[in-house]
Image (cartoon, coloured by chain):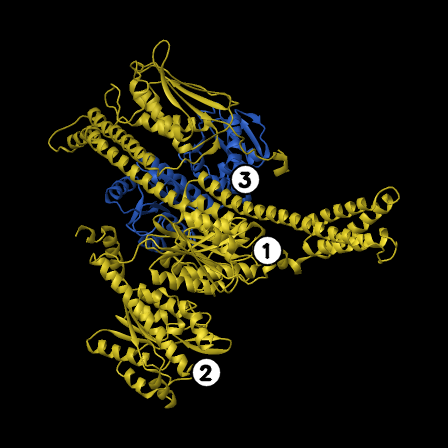
Amino acid sequence: MEEHRPDPDQLLDKMRRETERSREGQLKIFFGAAPGVGKTYAMLEAARQKHAEGVDVLVGLVETHGRKETETLLQGLEVLPRQGVEYRGKVLQEFDLDSALTRKPAVILVDELAHTNAPGSRHKKRWQDIYELLGAGISVYTTVNVQHLESLNDVVSQITGINVRETIPDFLLDRADEIELIDLPPDDLLQRLREGKVYMPEQAAAAIENFFRKGNLIALRELALRRTADRVDEQMQVYRQDKGIKDIWPAGERILVCVGHNPRSIRLIHAARRLAAGLRAEWIAVHVEAPSRVRSSESDRKQLADHMRLAESLGAETVTLSGQRMSEEILTYARSRNVSRIIIGKPSHARWKDKLFGSPLDEIVRGSGDLDVYVISGDVTKPHLHPAAKVQRGAVRKREWLWSVLTVATCTGIARLMFPYFERVDMVMVYLLGIVLIANRTSIWPTMFATLLSIAAFDFFFVPPQYTFAVNDVRHFVTFIVMFIVSFVISRLTLRVRQQAEAARMRERRTAALYNLSRDLVRERGAKRLSEIAMKHIGEVFDSQVAILIPDEQNQLAPSVTAPSSFTPDQQELSVAQWVYEHRQPAGLSTDTLPGAKALYLPMIASSGAIGVVGILPKTATDGFGPEQFHYLEAFANQTAIALERSFLGESAQRALLKAETESLRNTLLSSISHDLRTPLSAITGAATTLLQENIIIDEVSRIDLLQTIQEEAEHLNRIIRNVLDMTRLESGVIKVNKEWQSLEEIVGVVLNRLGERLNDHPVTLRIPGNLPLIPFDSLLLEQVFMNLFDNAIKYAPKGTPLELSASESFYTVTVELADRGPGIPPGEEEHIFEKFVRGRATGGGVGLGLAICRSIIEAHGGKIWAENREGGGAAFRFTLSSAGLPPAPKNEEETSHERI
Amino acid sequence: MTEEKELVLLIEDEPPMRRFLRITLQSNGYRLVETETGAEGLLQAASRNPDVVLLDLGLPDMDGFEVTTRLREWTQTPVIVISAREQEQDKVKALDAGADDYLTKPFNAGELLARIRVALRHALRQRSGRQEPVFSLYNLRVDLAQRQVFLDDREVHLTPIEYKLLTTLIRHAGKVITHRQLLTEVWGAAHVNEVQYLRVYMTQLRHKLESDPARPRFLMNEPGIGYRLKYDAEG
């Protein structure tokens, strides 16, 4: 029985699905074949039942259409007030999604799943509202009729002859936790219709009557029953899998459907969906983009994108391939993905085209080998040699026509000059050359026009009888025809080459823009800079203003940075962005969700999920972004997301490292500090208690001595604390190096002044050249370096020995040296002494941080610090600072002031 | 000293610091009002009209910048801020908002008293509106009426900006002047950020007036804050 054990991966997947589901609300659909079968009634009854059981039920929206029985059922249930949405002067009563979310009942009733919301609502479709309710953990009861199902839409219109515009994606039905089929035999339904119990909008009365024919009703009923049966079957499958009952279906069926921009592709998609559902197979919708087709019209591309989206919404994986030969691309891809069946449309174009250019369908069938190919009425994605120029018809410019005429005229002129010396055939060559030139410069129609014009001119000027369009010799017609065919082929080829080049250029431009973005992103660190770069690039490429919104700790989005190319969303726009972030779906301009927003908002999705939102506000008022731009924008958003994620991860790693380092520093510090702080403290406490003793008499000299001890030790304590604090702050990155151009002499003056009497025992010789330039440094930090170096010298060098401070500049580097005549540095210790908590031998030393702080500061300035023993005894501490660059020079004084002394 | 002793308003929340300041100030003959919070300090300033305010920057209720700004809305009473070393930015903000001087903890009693004396003298001069026509310090003598500068009776030639810089420092003698204040007074409000101008001219001035520019006696640099013409009121 081993093979009947459930697959552990599948079990895990199931568990995950179930946990996700348990957080979401339950969806129950009351499913019917036609209006009037009693779905709303059944839904309300179910709701009353729940209500009686004590469940918190809210009627979100129920259409009673004035029917008494239905209205009676509403009594005793809480009904959510509708929201008035103003549209074209009329106020439409719509479902109030936000109030429902705030009210958060256990179960909510929302009638008419396929309803289209009034413009200005958050979502275009009601099913999107319901999805949001489910996401918020609210269970939903809703109703829908079979004709609204996307995949059955075409079948229904075939049966009834009525086009149903309001459709819902099929996955909603799959998503439903429970489907209740409300079935009513057609005769009973017709009876109810006669009794006036079925609601009919007046304006469509005729159409509805047509709809309620018995034949229609039977067909619709069958569809509804079958769809429900399919679902029951699916549930059975799931049950079998869960229980480890062996799958009776051969696994690995995969269906590929070829999709184009032709509206008939929709039928192919629906057919593929049905086949896939029947086989329980995965399915892939494929579109082949040929380079020569890139110049297809905006509407074609939009159509295609709609088709792809439809396929996606029906559960297909969508793929766009690129290649010159459609058949080859499709077969190669099908093999690589182990596709078992291919669905393709029946060609609708003229047969001669296939004869002339080859038929993609034929090629696929021939090349399919063991693959099954289903040919369904509908169009082949596209005959890839379909004249692309068709689209450009309106775009042909006057200049191109003029160009054609001028070129033909010039050719005629040249031929006229050659006429006395050459054969007529050579004249033809001149015209052909002209046509090649024209094809190179203009589009298809001017070229064809030039071809005809050339033939006419040739006939008129060179074919006897000259200067008439009459032709003496029939052989000349052969010349004309050959001339026409050659011109035609040449122009087609030339145009194709140009279009391919252009397509390649366009792709290259896009790739280049995307590449530029990622290159710039890689170079930078820090979320702020990354955001700025992304904003700049997106802004330039899409001619828009951009906002990058990053969530704060409370998951509330806020603009990360502002730049010249950015915009700041107002509160309303921000709430759109917040929705996008929470639902990880695009919204705003050019989308179905909140299309009234000023800008388009795309989630930035990286490996860890959504990390923020990009808002794109077109600079010029447009209808929004085309599907191509939209996908392109998504690529930009994701690129940015990945870079930002990298930066966030880097920052958190950095923080963790810092924290660890700080922690270890703190530990060392604690052990070290307890001793070093206690020494001066005990001296102070001792001196103070002695002074406070009441019963002893201290002479004046001792009293002053004790007080001086207190003062000196307090100062000592202050220095230790200052160093400890500085070290912690330097290491934790709290201190920022604030470089300004300033004079070294000035800072030395401050230090000498501050040291004051402490230098009494150590005469200081200064050697700072008067012409030393200004150097960029942080005065407070450098002051600390000098203080510590002097502290060190005073501590180690014996009293009375001199100190020398000198500075010199060479090659834009200023080297500063403080030399003493102390004991020097033990050999091999020159590096070691700059480490933390390393102390020399002197008594009353500090914590051993002074030199470590100096090193941190100097290195933060980009300099070096080191120590050496001097010739003749003593130590020399040297450090370098860069003086490269130019200090901003003050303006010439005469220009700023005219007064003289 | 006048008959009525000067009144010092002390706004400080730390009891040990208050104790030290109380003893020091009272034993040096000042009268004292103590408060623990900024709000109470502002109230006392209005009702008692002190001659000088000692303001700690680390108050629990409001920052020194706010207290200074609100005081300056109605009074020119000198304000000396007391700060810890970590409050560099707050200090500059308070000074730019109109505080007269600052002390960094820990400080000694001598420093404190000198600052108070300078502040009181400035306030007095501002009230009387009088400026001595001749200013002298060590071997430096500046004749403000004749616009002449002498070192040991030898005239020193200064450029207009150097002279303006020097007279500005003299006008605030003993007090710290922030970079921003100096730049505004000498170069004009448009140049408040061009500290390097100031550095160049201060260096020039120091080389002309100080015998050892690296160990200045009176043209003192206050790193990160500004400059001070060292000048004790008693001296």
- Please indicate, yes or no, whether residue A574 appears anywhere in the rendered image: no
Q: Position of residue B22 (x, y in %)?
A: 27, 43
Q: Is residue A50 visible?
A: yes
Mark 1, other Cα within 10 Å: few <14 / some 14–19 / many ≥20: few
Tell me which chain the residue with mark 2 is part of.
Answer: A
Residue under mark 1: which chain is it in?
A
Q: What tint does the image give chain A?
A: yellow
| In this rendering, position of residue A111 left or right of residue A57 | right
For marks 3 and 1, give the CA distance: 91 Å
Q: Nearer the viewer, residue A357 or A149?
A: A357
Q: Position of residue A158 (x, y in %)?
A: 46, 73
The 10 Å Cα crowd at callout 3, few under 14, some 14 to 19, many 20 or more, is many
- Say above or below: A173 vs A210: above
At label 3, the amino acid type is Val
Please identify, in this view, whether the residue under mark 1 or under mark 2 is nearer the observer.
1
Q: Amino acid at mark 1?
A: Lys
Do the dots labelled 1 and 2 sit on one chain? yes
Q: Are marks 3 and 1 on the same chain?
A: no
The chain carrying label 3 is B
The mark closer to the camera, 3 or 1, is: 1
Q: Nearer the viewer, residue A105 or A815?
A: A105
Residue matched to label 2 = A210
Q: Is residue B41 above or below residue A116?
A: above
- Residue, disc 3: B186
Q: Which chain is blue?
A: B
Image quadrant where one finds the C terminus of chain A: top right
